[in-house]
């Protein structure tokens, strides 16, 4: 058996992006930053960790993201209390009263003593951290601890009374205590963000950016986390490039934003995709449509998948998101929300589509597109591409006029997009029109000790001029150095040997053309910059 240590591997659903990939990622991000700047967007960087409540309130407590996919944990340092809580929560306290009711012949309670001890210790140990605020003093926690203490005392009385009728109540009371213990949060519950719109709006409210007045245009680039089943184009850590406009509900914002996305995609060499567009109405018109949809579903839901049968009752709009093949013909025949918009939403949507036409942005109205998150209002959109296979949506977004208020901020209309960067990169690689900008510009090859110092000087100068430069670290034969230069894809090699030192003119070799010229030592930087068409940095 080998005694080599087993290497530790990356976490399922996450991946390393190696230099051969990151060069193109950087190129795409650079293009995105440039386009965002042209449309007057500024970068915002929010934390990856947020309070779980932020997503429950915005994305929606009933969504897949919040119910199944978030990486959440209680942030605290009370390991012992946690164990105690877990033991109370899961302990098996059994009571056997075979001859009840009507007699006191035989009562057996197993494991109750240790259970009561645990509860006593838990109630006692929690007091101090709660008083000083190390355990969150939330209304939920305070109430759970109060009730827990009360039921602990009640349990003691029941047991001590020895009366069978009282003892019969023990399992119920113990069960209550278990449930209450489970409810106590020893720390704030945190989540690795599954998306960033909620964070951006939280930051906007927290920093009272609305006091500055006007429209805020913000963008972000960074990792998101969802516990999904990994497959091509779907990861548990993935990246999004996103942008948000806060402070205006004008339909021109929607149209201009979509125009910007088209430009961004053109800049990274993409033209083959579809823009799907819809309106999901507003709190004024949507409830009535949901009723219409619920009624329509009543007659067909029995033929649909289990999820749809449940959603038909709890959240009928989500039925439209269903991907189950057999349900598709049924969904196609359901009523369309754009036929049920109120006058204001209708006018908004018509303005958006008219302006998209004027801006030469092509779109397909897609009545089923409601998007999975709770906060959307009016315009929703998605872009899809055939090259992506099953996971064919590479960006999505829309208007969210009520989100700020959902998060406790002032009424602030918003519009945004989240671009799935991993999927965007798959498309960019496939299109192969965008080139990564990471080739080596110059390899400085020197021979003989005397050339070492002048070579170092030249390398430094060229790097200061912004060129990407490499050199041999030890004296080496020319052939070996040139081999390295071509292996690294250098456009030029500068050769410095005894003869060059004597003449003050270095050999400059164009690696691809296999041509060589002599250039005055002091002219090398400007010569190479011109050849490489690089401006000074
Ligand atoms: P959403 O926030 O769900 O609207 O997603 C916006 C975009 O992010 C999608 O269109 C995808 O391109 C991308 N995306 C969402 N989830 C994942 C994932 N698990 N892995 C990779 N990309 C994702």
Image (spheres, rainbow, N blue to C red):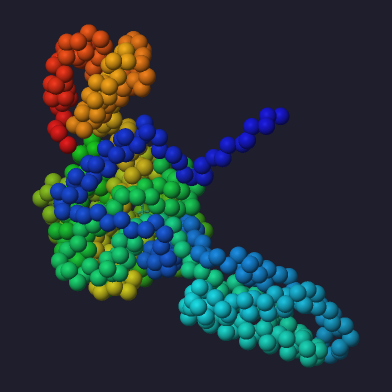
- Residue 39, relative to residue 524: is it above or below? below
Q: Tag count in the figure?
A: 0
Which residue does the image show at 21% across and 28% down from the upper left? 461
Q: Nearer the viewer, residue 496 or 63?
A: 496
- Which of the image's four quarters has the C terminus? top left
Q: Relative to residue 85, is residue 276 drawn left or right?
A: left
Residue 91 position in % (x across, y down): 71, 70
Q: Relative to residue 187, is residue 476 drawn left or right?
A: left
Q: Nearer the viewer, residue 185 or 97?
A: 185
- Residue farthest to the front? 450
Which residue does the image show at 42% across and 59% down from the upper left? 49
- Which of the image's four quarters has the N terminus? top right
Residue 421 position in % (x across, y down): 33, 44
Which residue does the image show at 20% across and 39% down from the upper left? 266
Residue 383 position in % (x across, y down): 29, 47
Which residue does the image show at 32% across and 15% down from the upper left? 449
Say which quarter of the image contains residue 58: bottom left
């Amino acid at each position: 058996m080998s005694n080599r240590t087993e290497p530790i591997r990356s976490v399922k659903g996450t991946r390393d992006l190696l230099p051969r990939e990151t060069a193109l990622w950087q190129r795409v991000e650079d293009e995105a930053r440039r386009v965002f700047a042209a449309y007057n967007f500024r970068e915002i960087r929010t934390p990856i960790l947020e309070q779980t409540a932020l997503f429950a309130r915005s994305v929606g407590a009933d969504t897949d993201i919040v119910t199944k996919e978030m990486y959440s944990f209680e942030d605290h340092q009370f390991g012992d209390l946690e164990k105690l809580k877990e033991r109370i929560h899961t302990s098996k306290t059994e009571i056997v009263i075979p001859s009840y009711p009507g007699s006191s012949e035989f009562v057996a309670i197993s494991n109750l003593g240790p259970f009561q001890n645990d509860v006593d210790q838990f109630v006692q140990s929690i007091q101090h951290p709660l008083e000083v605020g190390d355990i969150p003093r939330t209304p939920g926690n305070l109430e759970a601890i109060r009730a827990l203490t009360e039921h602990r005392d009640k349990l003691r009385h029941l047991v001590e009374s020895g009366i069978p009728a009282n003892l019969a109540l023990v399992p119920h009371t113990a069960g209550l205590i278990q449930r209450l213990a489970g409810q106590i949060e020893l720390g704030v519950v945190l989540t690795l963000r599954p998306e960033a719109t909620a964070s951006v709006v939280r930051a906007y409210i927290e920093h009272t950016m609305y006091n500055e007045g006007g429209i805020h245009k913000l963008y972000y680039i960074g990792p998101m986390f969802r516990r999904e089943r990994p497959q091509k184009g779907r990861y548990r850590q993935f990246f999004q490039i996103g942008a948000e406009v806060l402070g205006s509900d004008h339909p021109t914002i929607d149209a201009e934003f979509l125009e910007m996305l088209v430009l961004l995609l053109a800049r990274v060499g993409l033209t083959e995709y579809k823009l799907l567009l819809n309106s999901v109405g507003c709190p004024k018109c949507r409830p009535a449509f949901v009723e219409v949809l619920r009624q329509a579903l009543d007659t067909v839901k029995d033929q649909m998948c289990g999820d749809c049968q449940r959603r038909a009752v709890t959240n009928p709009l989500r039925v439209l998101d269903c991907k189950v093949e057999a349900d598709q013909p049924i969904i196609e025949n359901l009523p369309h929300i754009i036929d049920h918009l109120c006058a204001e939403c209708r006018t908004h949507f018509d303005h958006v589509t008219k302006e998209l036409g004027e801006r030469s942005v092509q779109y397909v109205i897609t009545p089923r597109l409601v998007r999975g998150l709770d906060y959307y209002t009016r315009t929703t959109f998605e872009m899809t591409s055939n090259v992506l296979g099953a996971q064919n949506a590479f960006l999505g977004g829309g208007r969210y006029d009520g989100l700020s208020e959902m998060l406790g901020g002032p009424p602030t209309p918003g519009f945004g997009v989240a671009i799935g960067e991993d999927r965007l990169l798959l498309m960019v690689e496939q299109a192969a029109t965008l080139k990564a900008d990471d080739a080596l510009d110059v390899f400085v090859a020197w021979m003989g000790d005397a050339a070492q110092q002048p070579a170092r000087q030249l390398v430094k100068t060229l790097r200061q001029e912004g060129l990407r430069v490499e050199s041999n670290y030890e004296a080496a034969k020319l052939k070996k150095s040139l081999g390295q230069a071509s292996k690294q894809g250098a456009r030029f090699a500068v050769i410095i040997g005894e003869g060059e030192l004597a003449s003050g003119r270095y050999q400059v070799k164009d690696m691809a053309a296999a041509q060589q010229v002599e250039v005055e030592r002091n002219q090398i930087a400007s010569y190479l910059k011109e050849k490489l068409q690089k401006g000074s940095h």
